[in-house]
Image (tube, helix red, strand yellow):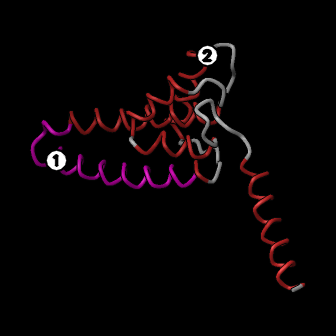
Amino acid sequence: MDEKNNEEEVTTEIIDSRNNEGGKKSTTGLEENIAAVICYLGAFITGIIFLFLEQSSKFVRFHAMQSTVLFLGLWIIQFILGFIPFFGWFLSGLIYLAGIILWVVLMVKSYQKEYYKLPVVGDLSEDFLAKLNPKDNV
C-alpha cells in the first residue's frame, strides 16, 4: 500500500513541476510555446494571423513575424524562379526542400521555448516588430 502512495506522490510531483514550467500563456489562451508552433504550422498565413491576434507575448509575436518574413520571402522567390526554365525550376526545388527543413526545425525550437533567431530573417523580424510596436523593444 505504501508503494502505491509513493507512486501517486511521484506522479503528482512530476505533473506539478510540468504545470509550473509551462506557465506563461499568450493572449490567445494557449501556452506561448504552443502558440509559437502554430505560427509556423501554416507558414506565413498563420504567422500573419498570430501577428493580429497576439497582443502581449513578445515570444509569440517574434515567431509569428519570423514565420511571415521567412515563408513569404521563400514563396516569392520560388514564384519568380518558376519562370526560369530548368535552372530556375531546380533552384526552386532546392528552396522548397530548405523550406521544409526550416519549417520542422523552427517548430521544434519554438516548442522547446527557444527564442531561435535565423541569421538574416530573425534580424528583419525584430526590426519589423519594433516598427509595428515602437513602445516594445523585442
Evaluate if marks 1 and 2 touch, with contact meaning CB atoms under 8 Å apart.
Answer: no
Quarter of the image with the C terminus is: top right
- Expressed as whole percent of the image width and height from the top left, the position of residue 112 reads 63, 54
- Expressed as whole percent of the image width and height from the top left, the position of residue 79 reads 21, 35
Q: Of marks 1 and 2, which one's residue comes earlier in the chain?
A: 1
Dominant secondary structure of the magenta stretch?
helix
**Is-magenta flag for residue 137?**
no
The residue that mark 2 highlights is 133
Q: Quadrant of residue 81?
A: top left
Determine the residue located farthest toward the left in the rendered image: 85
Looking at the picture, which amino acid does disc 1 mark?
A: Trp
Q: Quadrant of residue 59?
A: top right
- Expressed as whole percent of the image width and height from the top left, the position of residue 43 reads 39, 40
- Element carrying mark 2: loop
**Is 24 placed left or right of 29 in the picture?**
right
Dot 2 alpha-carbon crowd within 10 angstroms: few under 14, some 14 to 19, many 20 or more: few
- Element carrying mark 1: helix
Q: Quadrant of residue 123?
A: top right
The residue located at (64%, 43%) in the rendering is 31
Highlighted range, magenta:
81-109
Q: Is residue 54 above or below residue 93?
A: above
**Is 59 placed left or right of 19 in the picture?**
left
**Is-magenta flag for residue 85?**
yes
Nearer-the-camera pick, 104 or 5: 5
Nearer-the-camera pick, 134 or 54: 54
The residue that mark 1 highlights is 89
- Expressed as whole percent of the image width and height from the top left, the position of residue 102 reads 44, 50
Q: Is residue 90 above or below residue 11?
A: above
**Is 57 placed left or right of 104 in the picture?**
right
